[in-house]
Every structure is written in structure tokens, then in C-alpha cells.
Image: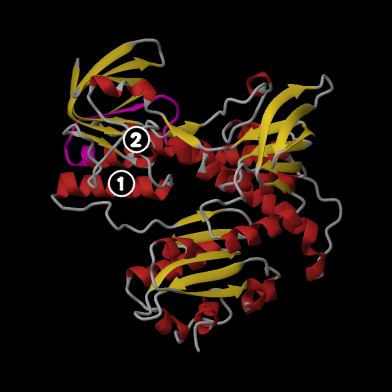
């Protein structure tokens, strides 16, 4: 049995930097990765999808720039080239991360699957067929999540796509049926629509974007439908079958009405589940919730002293930047003696549809549920000078504020570079800058942020 100061399970956006920080502090570290260094973000999440979103936007602009006085005839989408560009970007990031771990003499990088044998020991079934057993007083779990595959008749009999396998396509599908109307499903729907696929989206709930306000979801629905995406709410697939001619027949319940729809591909994007089962957490006594997410306190420690969980596997907001923040909390607490916690931390996020949807703080429905006194300011993007000038007038800016304290409670920015505009307001919120100050702030003209003047002007009597 090999003994380490720390064992890290998973090399995602918390695991890899934590290994490097602990090694720099003189700790001997083992980091175990069953697949590829970098986790979901680098390999089949943020990095590859945003690279392909850029290609899809280029195709969209090529097809609609006539209104700018520029005419492009005969453009084509080259999926093998799009995939190669994506793969090159992924490999650059993955190999750089892997090299930084392998080059550190205090880090042992093991490729294999880890499972607990006690609170301080881990068995590793290495990908090369060998087995190792490791021991450490501190163990950090950054094992992430995986795609949920719903139990629908016939689904396992078709060659369905996931958010991982769809990235490997080298031809544009004729017609994709997308199951799920939240962030992953919407990004891929718009991306492949712009590449040339016909898209039909099924959302089981009342509407897409179930975590957003009604007006925000309604605005995004209109934008996507305008691009030719067929969206069905209160819809669920109940059976899949092949027709023998390259088509997939899908029996669908559309708000109580049964219909049969056709497609050539199916993308499953109904959610993700924690990769905790294979870890044999019972052997360590680590508690999980009813969905399998690891329970942690606000210092990210489990119920077992010395065992921590970071990133998506602990539940809560499943974002790369939250996993990275988990890492910063843990290493500063353990190595610098600080007393940081996850309590009250901001949770910004951005959905990379076009226009983007950047969000921070409370939504209007959140404020209503909490019984807070609030007011709402909304500015449509077709009233924003910069948006008009560059021809990007779809979307809106929405802010929820406390009218007494002038505090900004939350914002939703659906706009070109909506994530960047949201970040300006996040900085204001974290710095205690009230909306009345932003109303008269001097921003460079003509920028998107300048229109925050006009957004908060909406709150004047």
C-alpha cells in the first residue's frame, strides 16, 4: 500500500489545481482520473461546446449579414473541420493540464477507477489492468456527474446522442429530436440548427428554462423559434423505434395528446447525476442524499473527518466556476489557515445561446417567493444603441432591486455578450454599488454597459 498526504479522486476544475497547490506546499499527492485530465469542462463541456458555438455563430452571421450590406454566397458548413478545431483546442488544454501534473515530483497521476475500502484507503483499478491501494489522511472527491438516460421504451435500441457523443459527429444530422429544454439542450439545439439540422425540442415542463422567470423564458422561446427550432412544452417521449429507412419514430405525449414524430437522431439532455455509486462510499461511511450527491458542510467537508467533496458531485450549482471556487476555499482553509465557507457566495452563470443569458443573484420569482419588497427594471435590447448599431437587437436586460436600499438583488441579461454585461453588475453587487449610482455612472459610449444607465432609469418615478 502506498501512503500519501492527500488523495484526489478526479482531475476536474477543482481536483487538478488542488493537487498542484498541495504539491507546492510540500505534500505528497496522488490524483486518480478514470478518463481524461481536465474533467467534463475541458473534454466534453465548456471548452469544446463553446468552440463549436463559435463555429455555429459564424454560420449564422454568414447567412444573415445581408441586412448589414454584406452578401455572402455559397458558404458551407464543414463539420470535419469544425470538429478538428474543437479537438485541437481540447487537446491543447488537456495535454497542458496533464503535463503540469506529471512534471511535478510531488504528484503521482494514476489513470483508473477509484473506490473506497475504508475512510483513509482507496483501491484503484488502473486502466492498464493492474490494481493499487492507496492511503492518506485527507481525501478529496472531484468525480463529477454523468448524463441521465431516462427509462423510455426503445431508447436503448436506438443510437441516441449525449452531450459527449454529439461532439464527435462529422456530418450534420438531418433532424435531431432534443429531450430537455434547459441549458445543455438549448445550446446544442441552436448550434446544430445553425449547422443545418432540423430541430424538434421536447420539454416535459410548462416551458423551457424552468429555473428562469417567465418573461425571460418567453423571450428565449421566441428567439429560438424564430431560428426555426420547433419547441414543444408539456411534452414527453414515450416510445422510440426505428422505421428501417434511417428514421426514428418517436411516440410523444403532447399535453395529453399522443402523436408520432419523425427524426434521424435523438439527443438526451434531461439532466445529470452524480458519479458516486462506483466510489463505494459506504466503506468510508460518507453520507449521500437521495439522488446520490455527497453531503458536505459549508467548508466542503463530508460527515467523515478528512474527506471532502468538491464540484458537481456534492450537488448544488453545477458550474465549472463553482468547482474552481470550491478548490480555492479548501486549499486556503487547509494550507493558509483561513476560515472561508460557501455561505452566501455569488453564483453567476451564463448560458451560451446567442444571445447569451447571463444571470446573477435573485430572479423576480425568487424575490416573490421570499416575500421581499422589490421592483423590476426591464430594457429590451432593441432600445440599446450598441445593439442597434451592430444588428444584435434580440433579448433584454432585467434587474430586480430593493427600492428602499437601492440594492441590486439580481439581474438577467439576455444579449450579445450578456455574460460580460452581467459581470459588470455582479461587481457592483459585490462592491455594494447601488442601482441609483449606476444610473448616473459614466460609461464609455457606445458600449453595452452604457445602457445600464437606461436600464435603471426605468425605475425613476
> Which of the two residues, 154 or 52, is positioned nearer the viewer here?
154
Q: Secondary structure at mark 1?
A: helix
Which quarter shows the N terminus? top left
Mark yes or no: residue 170 visible. no
Question: From which residue to which does the magenta span run?
Answer: 22-38
Q: x and y percent of residue 284 in the render?
A: 23, 23
* Residue furthest front as drawn: 256
Classify residue 337 as left or right of residue 452.
left
Q: x and y percent of residue 384 in the render?
A: 62, 77
Q: Which mark is residue 326?
A: 1
Q: Secondary structure at mark 2?
A: loop
Q: Dot 2 surroundings within 10 Å: few (below 14), some, or many (20 or more)? A: many
Mark 2 lies on residue: 142
Quarter-wise, where is residue 355 in the image? bottom right
* 224 vs 132: above or below: below
Contact, mark 2 vs mark 1 (Cβ under 8 Å)? no
> Which of the two residues, 229 or 384, is positioned nearer the viewer here?
229
Quarter-wise, where is residue 200 in the image? top right
* Residue furthest left as drawn: 337
Amino acid at each position: 500500500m502506498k501512503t500519501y498526504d492527500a488523495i484526489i479522486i478526479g482531475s476536474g476544475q477543482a481536483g487538478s489545481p488542488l493537487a498542484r497547490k498541495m504539491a507546492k506546499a510540500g505534500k505528497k499527492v496522488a490524483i486518480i482520473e478514470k478518463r481524461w485530465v481536465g474533467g467534463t469542462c475541458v473534454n466534453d463541456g465548456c471548452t469544446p461546446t463553446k468552440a463549436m458555438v463559435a463555429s455555429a455563430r459564424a454560420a449564422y452571421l454568414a447567412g444573415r449579414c445581408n441586412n448589414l450590406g454584406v452578401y455572402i454566397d455559397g458558404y458551407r458548413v464543414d463539420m470535419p473541420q469544425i470538429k478538428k478545431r474543437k479537438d485541437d483546442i481540447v487537446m491543447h488544454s488537456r495535454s497542458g493540464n496533464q503535463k503540469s501534473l506529471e512534471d511535478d515530483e510531488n504528484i503521482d497521476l494514476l489513470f483508473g477507477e477509484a473506490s473506497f475500502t475504508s475512510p483513509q484507503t482507496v483501491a484503484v483499478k488502473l486502466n492498464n489492468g493492474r490494481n493499487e491501494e492507496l492511503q492518506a489522511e485527507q481525501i478529496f472527491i472531484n468525480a463529477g456527474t454523468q448524463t441521465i438516460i431516462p427509462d423510455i421504451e426503445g431508447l436503448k435500441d436506438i443510437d441516441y446522442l449525449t452531450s459527449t457523443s454529439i461532439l464527435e459527429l462529422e456530418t450534420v444530422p438531418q433532424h435531431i429530436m432534443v429531450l430537455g429544454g434547459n441549458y445543455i439542450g438549448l445550446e446544442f439545439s441552436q448550434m446544430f440548427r445553425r449547422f443545418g439540422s432540423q430541430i424538434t425540442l421536447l420539454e416535459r415542463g410548462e416551458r423551457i428554462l424552468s429555473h428562469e422567470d417567465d418573461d425571460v423564458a418567453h423571450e428565449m422561446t421566441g428567439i429560438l423559434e424564430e431560428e426555426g427550432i420547433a419547441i414543444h412544452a408539456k411534452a414527453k417521449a414515450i416510445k422510440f423505434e426505428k422505421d428501417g429507412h434511417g428514421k426514428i419514430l418517436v411516440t410523444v405525449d403532447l399535453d395529453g395528446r399522443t402523436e408520432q414524430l419523425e427524426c434521424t437522431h435523438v439527443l438526451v439532455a434531461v439532466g445529470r447525476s452524480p458519479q458516486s455509486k462506483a466510489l463505494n462510499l459506504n466503506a468510508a461511511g460518507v453520507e449521500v442524499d437521495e439522488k446520490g450527491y455527497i453531503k458536505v458542510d459549508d467548508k466542503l467537508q463530508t460527515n467523515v473527518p478528512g474527506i471532502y467533496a468538491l464540484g458537481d458531485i456534492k450537488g448544488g450549482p453545477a458550474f465549472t466556476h463553482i468547482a474552481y471556487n470550491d478548490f480555492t476555499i479548501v486549499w486556503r482553509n487547509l494550507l493558509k489557515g483561513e476560515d472561508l465557507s460557501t455561505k452566501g457566495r455569488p453564483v453567476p452563470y451564463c448560458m451560451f445561446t446567442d444571445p447569451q443569458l447571463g444571470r446573477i443573484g435573485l430572479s423576480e420569482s425568487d424575490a416573490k417567493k421570499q416575500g421581499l419588497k422589490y421592483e423590476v427594471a426591464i430594457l429590451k435590447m432593441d432600445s440599446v444603441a450598441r445593439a442597434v448599431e451592430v444588428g444584435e437587437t434580440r433579448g433584454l436586460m432585467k434587474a430586480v432591486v430593493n427600492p428602499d436600499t437601492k440594492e441590486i438583488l439580481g439581474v438577467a441579461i439576455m444579449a450579445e455578450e450578456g455574460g460580460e454585461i452581467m459581470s459588470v453588475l455582479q461587481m457592483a453587487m459585490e462592491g455594494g454599488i447601488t442601482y441609483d449610482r449606476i444610473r448616473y455612472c459614466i460609461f464609455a459610449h457606445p458600449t453595452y454597459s452604457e445602457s445600464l444607465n437606461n436600464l435603471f432609469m426605468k425605475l425613476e418615478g
